[in-house]
Image (cartoon, rainbow, N blue to C red):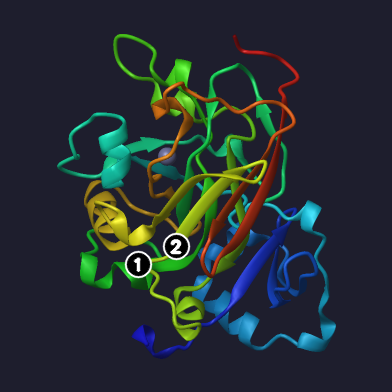
């Protein structure tokens, strides 16, 4: 294991606090408080891992599923990668990108794994995605050492308001993807070693998404055009990736905008997103308190 540590762990947040998950039975999770401020805990990730190794598991408390927040509650930067699965580029009739196609989701859109998703219009779409949380500052990092800079992985939904996203003449990706509640993440942060210990390959995980039980997306992260390591290499050549930063790595085929007829999320629908080894998001769609359009 790189770095000489075997770090097979899961973490969860409630409010700003970071917990080590000691029992990950879905619906009945327990955990031990590791740090009162998760953002600070990411800034000192090696110390946080050492603290997590030393916790007294008998001090575990129930973690209320409804109270879970984004595993990184206050990232300084949130990136999204567009058109990163071959089948998704095909369904939207666009050529494969020559480099990772990067946009930002502004941090105020992030929410928890079981939070309601607010629909501000009639053209809101789903995008089930693997999400990376950075654990160590990354600047000019090559792909071979990129995984050393990853704190862990989780499931995410890159909820997208397609009319705003496609505003002419140029696109408005960041606005279309940053309405309140448009970034559910979780349910926990899973370290790459935790996946390897379970016999899984962090670069090739099954992911799927359903609406009211009807499957709409099904793929594997191994089908990404740019995997986790090349994305980190590319971003870190442009900018400095900071501990706690979040990367939504792109969605496979099966989104609503590409369907004929097109399909949009409706109030009352339950959006369920799952990635092998990482867990499940359950997000109920509701009307936004104020409509955008
Ligand atoms: Zn996306």
In the rendered image, residue 182, in percent from the top left (x then y), is placed at 58, 35
In the rendered image, residue 226, in percent from the top left (x then y), is placed at 25, 53
Front residue (pair 235, 212):
212
Badge 2: how crowded within 10 Å, few (<14), some, or many (20+)?
A: some
Q: What residue is shown at x 83% (from left), y 83% (from top)? A: 59
Q: What residue is shown at x 22% (from left), y 71% (from top)? A: 144
Give me the disc on residue 206: 2
Query: Can residue 133 be seen at all in this image of the molecule?
Result: no
In the rendered image, residue 193, in percent from the top left (x then y), is placed at 46, 80
Is 208 left or right of 270, judged from the image as shown?
left
Q: What residue is shown at x 45% (from left), y 74% (from top)? A: 192
Residue under pointer 1: 203
Front residue (pair 133, 89):
89
State whether residue 227 is above or below residue 150: above
> Do the residues bearing badges 1 and 2 touch, measured as CB atoms within 8 Å?
no
Front residue (pair 134, 220):
220
The secondary element bearing badge 1 is classed as loop
The secondary element bearing badge 2 is classed as strand
State whether residue 238 is above or below residue 123: below
State whether residue 28 is above or below residue 85: below
In the rendered image, residue 176, in percent from the top left (x then y), is placed at 48, 24
Q: Pick the quarter of the image with the N terminus.
A: bottom left
**Residue lying farthest to the left in this orientation:** 98
Splitting the image into 4 quarters, where does residue 88 fall?
top left
């Amino acid at each position: 294991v790189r770095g000489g540590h075997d770090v097979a762990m899961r973490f969860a947040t409630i409010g700003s606090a970071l917990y080590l998950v000691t029992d990950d039975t879905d619906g009945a999770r327990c955990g031990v408080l590791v740090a009162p401020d998760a953002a600070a805990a990411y800034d000192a990730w090696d110390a946080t891992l050492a603290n997590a190794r030393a916790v007294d598991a008998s001090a575990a408390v129930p973690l209320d599923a409804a109270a879970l927040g984004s595993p990184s509650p206050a990232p300084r930067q949130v990136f999204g990668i567009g058109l990163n699965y071959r089948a998704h580029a095909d369904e939207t009739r666009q050529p494969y990108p020559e480099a990772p196609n990067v946009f930002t989701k502004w941090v105020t859109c992030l929410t928890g794994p079981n939070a309601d998703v607010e629909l501000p219009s009639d053209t809101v779409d789903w995008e089930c995605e693997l999400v990376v949380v950075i654990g160590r500052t990354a600047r000019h990092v090559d792909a071979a050492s990129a995984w050393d800079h990853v704190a862990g992985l989780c499931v995410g939904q890159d909820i997208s308001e397609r009319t705003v996203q496609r505003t002419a003449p140029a696109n408005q990706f960041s606005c279309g993807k940053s309405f309140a509640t448009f970034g559910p993440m979780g349910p926990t942060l899973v370290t790459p070693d935790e996946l390897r210990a379970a016999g899984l390959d962090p670069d090739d995980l099954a992911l799927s998404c359903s609406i009211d039980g009807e499957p709409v997306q099904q793929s594997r992260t191994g089908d990404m055009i740019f995997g986790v390591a090349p994305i980190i290499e590319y971003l870190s050549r442009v900018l400095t990736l900071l501990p706690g930063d979040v990367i939504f790595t792109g969605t496979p085929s099966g989104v609503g905008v590409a369907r004929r007829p097109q399909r949009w999320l409706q109030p009352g629908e339950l959006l369920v997103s799952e990635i092998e080894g990482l867990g499940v998001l359950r997000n109920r769609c509701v009307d936004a308190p104020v409509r955008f359009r």
